Image (tube, coloured by chain):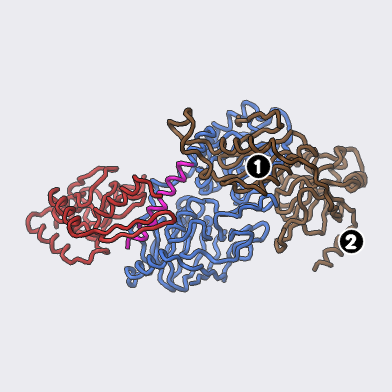
Chain colours: A brown, B blue, C red
Amino acid sequence: MPDITMKEKWGYEVSPLGDTSVIVQFGTGINEVSHRNVLALTSYFEEHPFPGMIEIVPAFTTVTIFYDPMKLYDPFPVEERKRTSVGSPYDTVCSILERIVPKLDRTVRETERVIHIPVCYGGELGPDLDEVARSHHMTADEVIEIHSGQEYLVYMIGFAPGFPYLGGMSERIATPRRRSPRMAIPAGAVGIGGSQTGIYPISTPGGWQIIGRTPLRLFRPEHQTPSLLKAGDKVRFQPIGLDQYKEWNEDQL
Amino acid sequence: MSISVLRAGLLTTVQDKGRFGYRKEGVIVGGAMDLFALRIANLLVGNEEGKAALEVTLMGPSILFETETLISICGGNLTPSVGGKELPLWRPVYIQAGQMLEFGACQSGARAYVAIAGGIEVPEVMQSRSTYLRAGLGGLEGRALKEGDKLYNGTLTERSAAYMEYMASNAGSQPFQAADWYVGDRQFPAYAKNPVIRVLRGREFEWFTEESQETFFTAPFRVTSQSDRMGYRLKGTKLDLKAEKEVVSEAVTFGTIQVPAEGDPIILMADCQTVGGYPKIAQVVSMDLPVLAQVKPGTTVQFKEVSLQEAEDLYIWKEMEFGKMAKGIELFLSNI
Amino acid sequence: MIPYRELQDIIQLVCRSPIQNFHYSDDTSKILIEKTGPTAKVAQEDVEHENCPSQLEALTPERSNDPAADDKAKEKKNDTDFLEIVSPMVGTFYSSSEQDAPPLVNIGDKVHPDSVVCVLEAMKMFSEVPSTVSGEIVEILVQDGQLVEYGQPLFRVKSL
């Protein structure tokens, strides 16, 4: 079992992802409190990386820290490890966290950006829409209305370049991932995985239920910040017809 | 110096040590599958260990060297030859201008790395020259090499230039001249056809039934043909969760073993996504990633549990040994 | 910094090899070893003391610029029908190039000057040792994994 250290006072747990990274977990549910903690630790390490830190990956409830063990091991270890080994790089990172987490600035940062994402739902572009509707005893239009009827928070970017993990989707349309992932999902596909929704920026394998597609490009490698969305942004989906979707594509050509 | 691709091979890409610092934008690390072979190949031609080289997969390309070149081929043995004569691996080799490098049968491993003195010069994209196939980024136009491609090398280090001159003077009219020293397999990671891979328990290990936990460490798993640079799909005894449960997506990395609901594990490889939402049963220790990189579809792997302390000690020991090898290589390159 | 142990290895390697001047540098350290007359002599005396037939045979042919090596080998041949292949450097002796590979030569094998007869590991690198003589291997004088000295006889060869 991963060596989990409870930090009840500050509400975080640390466990190794492997021999070169640790996962710091703030709570277990997807919510604003976890998100604030994640953003606070992320921005701290972005401004004050420790020697040996390679990069960090914020997620819903976790921040994963990748590091170079050769810059963090202790050549003069504590007694119990002395005979066979050196001091643990993992322990070094844990003690850095112990110092930093209590001092984090968790003040909420107001988001200014609301990005509108046009989506053509159903049909060939959303092959799983009917299945999602059926599993909730709804019509396809009801699913669309719920999916496009609210604002979402971008919790993190991941899985594919520029892929936003969005929080705030109604539990009424939450649908488990497909039992077997698809080998290829096209760029622009909008999907539901569990109680999460997102958009595939590039063609990639994936296990989410695909309910529609956007003509917008979410990953633009030629831009200085390749990802259209960033953590903290708000997103709204706008239903469009197949004709509008096709025109959009033609506009881009 | 330039090289021309006469035949592309199955999958030949430009790779370096990977693209770091962009995982939070969802940009994968990528880079060489077998970092040990890439790093050694670079050192053997006098490059810094992280220079871009060619990653050759199972069926190799045919490459014409338009000018004299110092190369080294490390990793799997895909029977490289020049001028009809087999080229030895894991050592510097001087190639005369106008010679062609070809590959034959895959005798061992799955991937060979061809390093060229000066490194392969392609534009850096987000601080790396690695080819990111799915996003069409990096490497040569973001894709695998194809017939007719031309590649150039970067500036040679003094060490590379001096050693190449020395080898050239020994080559005479031979199509190539191989060094009489090499990195021996006694120094290699535990490359094997059907290897035992050391792993740490994953964060969701306890979610699996006790039977599945035991199966994971005792049963062999076959690497299926649905395996690529992104991940290896395994087939074996199905692994079941105690109760159906979803993971809140979080970071995954090279070597993470996750199990989708259907019960067949997937080992994430160099081109894996930055985050994942399937239960993680285990994490391969860094030292055994090169071993996995050289596993062919159709062979089997078995998993053996180690503690975090063992994994960290292995990592540090491996890097210290690597440092000694790097010094040895420098010494032999300067000893001319 | 180069650890003390490795520095020792390097100095040994250079001292026992035919190299006269050795320069090495990396980001953190610089090594300069220059051999002068007396030191070289000491090395020679050592070799003679160990009853080595010819320290000059120790030079690998491609790095040799001393034609005397071949003459000496021939002289030896006149003394007796047996020649020795001696170690060109300090290192760990291995009879095969790779762990599971068969030995490079066995007793009874015919060798010629370019035949690779064994490999020696030093500084984590493996060097191929050429026979330097022609004949038939009659005895292997060292064991796998054994540390051998510069000039130490490795094989006895019957001249044909």
Along the horizontal axis of the image, is A58 left or right of B51? right
Along the horizontal axis of the image, is B158 left or right of B296? left
Q: Nearer the viewer, mark 1 or mark 2?
A: 1
Viewport quadrant of the C terminus of chain B:
bottom left
- Residue drawn at 18 percent across, 47 percent down: C139
- Residue drawn at 90 percent across, 57 percent down: A241
Nearer to me, C130 or A37 = A37
Along the horizontal axis of the image, is A229 left or right of B166? right
Chain label for disc 2: A
Type of amino acid at the residue the image marks with label 2 = Gln
In the image, residue B276 lies in the stretch drawn in magenta: no
- Say if residue B225 shows up in the picture: no
Image location of residue C39, percent across then percent down: 20, 55
Q: Which residue is mark 2?
A: A244
Q: Residues within 10 Å of mark 2 (few under 14, many from 20)?
A: some
Which residue, as the protein is rendered here, is positioned at the far front?
A: A103
Please give the count of numbered marks on the rendered protein: 2
SS for dot 2: helix
Type of amino acid at the residue the image marks with label 1 = Thr
Give the answer, above or below, for where B166 lies relative to B285: below
Along the horizontal axis of the image, is B4 left or right of B264? left
Image location of residue A63, percent across then percent down: 68, 41
Q: Which residue is mark 1?
A: A64
In the image, residue B318 lies in the stretch drawn in magenta: yes
Give the answer, above or below, for where B138 lies relative to B97: above
Image location of residue C59, percent across then percent down: 23, 59
Residue A145: give its label.
none
Nearer to me, A179 or C65 = C65
SS for dot 1: strand
Magenta extent? B316-336
